[in-house]
Amino acid sequence: MPEEITKQKPEVWRRINWPGAIAGVLTIALPFMGTWWRLTLGMDAVIMEISPFGVDMSFFGEEAISTPLFWWLCLGLKLGVVYLGVLLLVGSILSISDRRAAIAEQFVRFSARKLLWLVVAFVVLLLIVITLVNQLPGIFSSFIGDSFFQLQSDLPYYLSGEGTISGGAEGVGMHLTIPVFMKLTRAFAVAVLAATLGIVSRVYQKRVSIYKSRRKT
């Protein structure tokens, strides 16, 4: 009897979708890990902390208040991501059961790639905003024409690093340069890891199904 138990234990552990289980846990925790990207203008004059689950802004130490509608939208996205994480975790663990194999595969297939699209959409949106800000001087000059006021913007496209926004009036001899600091946080790294493991979990789920079929035969 002890020998049979020891033989069954490795089989049970092999039938768990481990990448999916880890991705599920990380996805559940992700909405509560804080901001993904931080933007600072000047010496902490303006601070923006952004994630798909909320935006926190402060101006000279005073926090900006978000609208109730935006708060509810962020709450809905948080609940949706937690729901996806629960499905992925449950589906990965249910892979143990032969009786619930079909449900487990459906859960994993449905939830495995959703976080990846959220991460991609977040990065693309930030790149679009940075591109628009860098193109703002050209747009400004095209509307106003040759003006005594000159505007320049140089923000890095890799989302982390330092840049500047400067402007000045030639006739007056006034020139102002504002340093800009951008940073991707650890929460974003966790999101990338969870999204990657989610993709791996779909492939791993097929291996679990193949292992089950071979074990039956």
Image: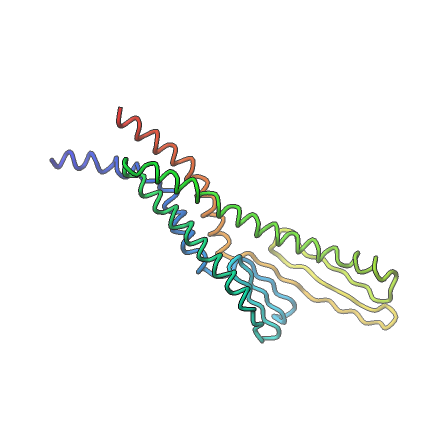
Instruction: Write down the quadrant of residue 169 in the picture.
Output: bottom right
Q: Nearer the viewer, residue 21 or 148?
A: 21
Position above or below: 211 against 127: above
Position above or below: 150 against 125: below
Position above or below: 142 against 9: below
Q: Is residue 33 left or right of residue 214?
A: right
Quadrant of the snapshot with the N terminus = top left
Q: Nearer the viewer, residue 203 or 151?
A: 203
Instruction: Write down the quadrant of residue 136 in the picture.
Output: bottom right
Q: Is residue 195 left or right of residue 136?
A: left
Q: Is residue 214 left or right of residue 32?
A: left
Q: Is residue 23 left or right of residue 139?
A: left
- In the picture as drawn, the residue positioned furthest to the front comes out as 69
Q: How is the image coloured?
A: rainbow
**Number of marks in the rendered image:** 0
**Where is residue 15 drawn, in percent x and y?**
30, 37
**Where is residue 174 drawn, in percent x and y?**
81, 72
**Where is residue 60 drawn, in percent x and y?**
61, 75
For image coordinates 58% across by 68% down, the residue present is: 57
**Where is residue 66 drawn, in percent x and y?**
56, 69
Q: Nearer the viewer, residue 91 or 197?
A: 91
- In the picture as drawn, the residue positioned furthest to the left comes out as 1
